[in-house]
Image (cartoon, grey):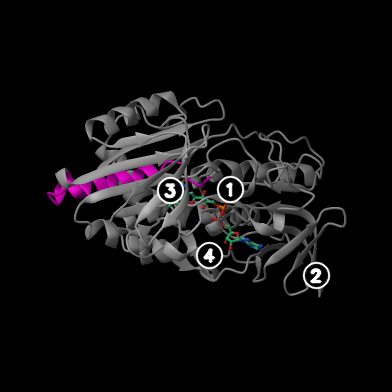
């Protein structure tokens, strides 16, 4: 079936719904469609708190249809190809959907096959993750039932969404072990592919003192390559020496490898790594001027977060409308992103920074300090800002 829209949005996640809502406000009669097979919509930042036993997982989900802005067509199909030369989007239902302007935001995908044994082990016998709705409550179950031994937390050798989350869940777990009176029986270990704890020096310094004070062992430039569930062992490879190390675990929190969604891999609109190739400031495609991209799928050299999307949405909307009206694209995104680093039940470092890794702080105090007020922002304010602000085109 062939249909056509003025603006087609591929992906109705954080970016897709937010951008549709804002566009609809600006051009109420615009013919806009979102293509996405999803029936449910997840507020993923809550998964850290679910994994830490602070929220039930159901608090992070709503029906997708209830969030589609009124007047926007929701096409529940899987995009299989984008043909930028013919300005067509193709789907698994053999639909051919033409567009005048295209916004690409299908997020990223988790590569469950990227670690040997992960697919089989996940969700069972202490192997958990907060990176997938189905397993997020298992994470809290595993932390709550932990009786001591090796608690191992990982960070993979790929770009991921929310680079702080692998540490946040570790801090929540470590605090729980202390509260439960079993800390002396636990060894908490963080194996990260990164060369340091955080990209921005100001926040890194606080995190370095936290791991020191709390007796957490950190191993850099190592990534998980295999889980031997039978013997409860995790195998890590050193990124430079390529040496492997086998680590026994009693609890293993895995941050799985991630990458571009499958249909984009051989597309004409992506860079060599498979991310949509856009100008980092205007968010317009580098070759196809009627295409824009934002969110986790775009090749923006900043941390992939919903907070980043909040600043990208007005830029895409402004520039797309400018293009439509033959004006210059004047809105510029500066790489702003934010990572509310939960360091305990009631403690949080509110990291905010830009492309240059320079802090871009909102509040009139030093945000590199752990604060209860910032924890309350994460727990109560940000979810409301998401559901009733961002997704409604208001924030
Ligand atoms: C554990 C965790 C903690 C996080 N913590 C924070 C935090 O504290 N702060 C923060 O700002 N961010 C956080 N994030 C990151 C944030 O949730 C993501 O960066 C954000 O949701 C990405 O939005 P997106 O629209 O790019 O992708 P998504 O919201 O993932 O949406 C992508 C959409 O595209 C659809 N799609 C995929 N493939 C296709 C296809 N072929 N055809 C059609 N549709 C398709 C999907 O169904 C989905 O609906 C966290 C994420 C996780 C997992």
Which of the marked residues, 3 or 4, is nearer the chain's N terminus? Answer: 4
Answer above or below: position of 141 versus 84.
below
Q: Is residue 358 left or right of residue 10?
A: left
Answer above or below: position of 358 versus 52.
above
Which residue is pictured at 12% across the width and 49% down the height?
A: 181
- Distance, label 2 to label 3, CA atoms, is 50 Å
Q: Name the residue under label 3.
A: 235
Between marks 1 and 3 in the image, the one whose residue lies nearer the viewer? 3
- Badge 4 marks a residue whose secondary structure is helix
Q: Name the residue under label 4.
A: 67
- Distance, label 1 to label 2, CA atoms, is 27 Å
Which of the marked residues, 2 or 4, is nearer the chain's N terminus? Answer: 2
276 or 69, nearer to the observer: 276
Looking at the figure, which quarter contains the N terminus? bottom right
Mostly what secondary structure, the magenta segment?
helix
Disc 4 crowd rating (10 Å Cα; few below 14, some 14-19, many 20+) is some
Q: How many numbered tags mark residues here? A: 4
Disc 3 crowd rating (10 Å Cα; few below 14, some 14-19, many 20+) is some
Which of the marked residues, 4 or 1, is nearer the chain's N terminus? Answer: 4
Which residue is pictured at 52% across the width and 56% down the height?
A: 391
Which of the marked residues, 1 or 2, is nearer the chain's N terminus? Answer: 2
Q: Is mark 1 within 8 Å of ligand 1?
A: yes
Give the magenta-colored segment's residue range.
160-183
Which of the marked residues, 1 or 3, is nearer the chain's N terminus? Answer: 3
- Distance, label 1 to label 3, CA atoms, is 28 Å
- Distance, label 4 to label 1, CA atoms, is 20 Å
Between marks 4 and 1 in the image, the one whose residue lies nearer the viewer? 1
Disc 1 crowd rating (10 Å Cα; few below 14, some 14-19, many 20+) is many
- Distance, label 2 to label 4, CA atoms, is 23 Å
List x then y, in percent, for residue 49: 33, 53
Q: Name the residue under label 1.
A: 296
Q: Name the residue under label 2.
A: 3
């Amino acid at each position: 079936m062939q249909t056509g829209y003025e603006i087609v949005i591929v992906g109705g996640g954080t970016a897709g719904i937010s951008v549709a809502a804002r566009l609809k406000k600006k051009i109420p009669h615009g013919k806009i469609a979102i293509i996405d097979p999803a029936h449910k919509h997840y507020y993923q930042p809550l998964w850290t708190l679910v994994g830490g036993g602070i929220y039930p997982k159901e608090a992070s989900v709503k029906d997708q249809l209830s969030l589609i802005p009124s007047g926007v067509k929701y096409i529940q199909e899987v995009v299989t190809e984008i043909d930028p030369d013919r300005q067509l989007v193709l789907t698994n239902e053999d639909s051919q959907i033409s567009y005048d302007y295209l916004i690409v935001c299908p997020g990223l995908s988790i590569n469950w096959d990227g670690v040997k044994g992960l697919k089989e082990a996940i969700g069972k016998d202490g192997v958990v993750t907060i990176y997938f709705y189905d397993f997020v409550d298992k994470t809290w179950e595993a932390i709550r039932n932990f009786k001591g031994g090796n608690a191992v937390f990982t960070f993979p050798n790929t770009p991921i969404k929310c680079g702080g989350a692998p540490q946040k869940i570790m801090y929540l777990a470590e605090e729980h072990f202390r509260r439960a009176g079993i800390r002396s029986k636990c060894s908490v270990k963080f194996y990260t592919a990164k060369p340091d704890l955080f990209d921005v020096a100001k926040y890194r310094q606080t995190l370095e003192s936290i791991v020191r004070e709390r007796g957490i062992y950190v191993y850099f430039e190592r990534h998980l390559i295999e889980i031997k569930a039978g013997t409860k062992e995790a195998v890590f490879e050193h990124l430079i020496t390529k040496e492997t190390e086998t680590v026994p675990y009693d609890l293993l929190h895995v941050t799985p490898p991630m990458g571009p969604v499958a249909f984009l891999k051989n597309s004409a609109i992506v860079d060599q790594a498979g991310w949509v190739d856009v100008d980092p400031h205007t968010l317009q495609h580098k070759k196809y001027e009627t295409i824009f991209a934002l969110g986790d799928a775009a090749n923006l050299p900043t941390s992939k977060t919903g907070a980043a999307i909040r600043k990208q949405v007005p830029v895409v909307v402004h520039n797309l409308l400018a293009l439509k009206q033959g004006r210059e694209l004047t809105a510029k995104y500066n790489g702003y992103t934010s990572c509310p680093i939960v360091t305990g039940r009631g403690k949080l470092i509110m990291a905010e920074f830009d492309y240059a890794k320079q802090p871009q702080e909102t509040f009139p105090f030093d945000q590199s300090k752990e604060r209860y007020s910032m924890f309350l922002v994460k727990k109560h304010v940000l979810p409301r800002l998401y559901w009733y602000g961002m997704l409604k085109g208001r924030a």
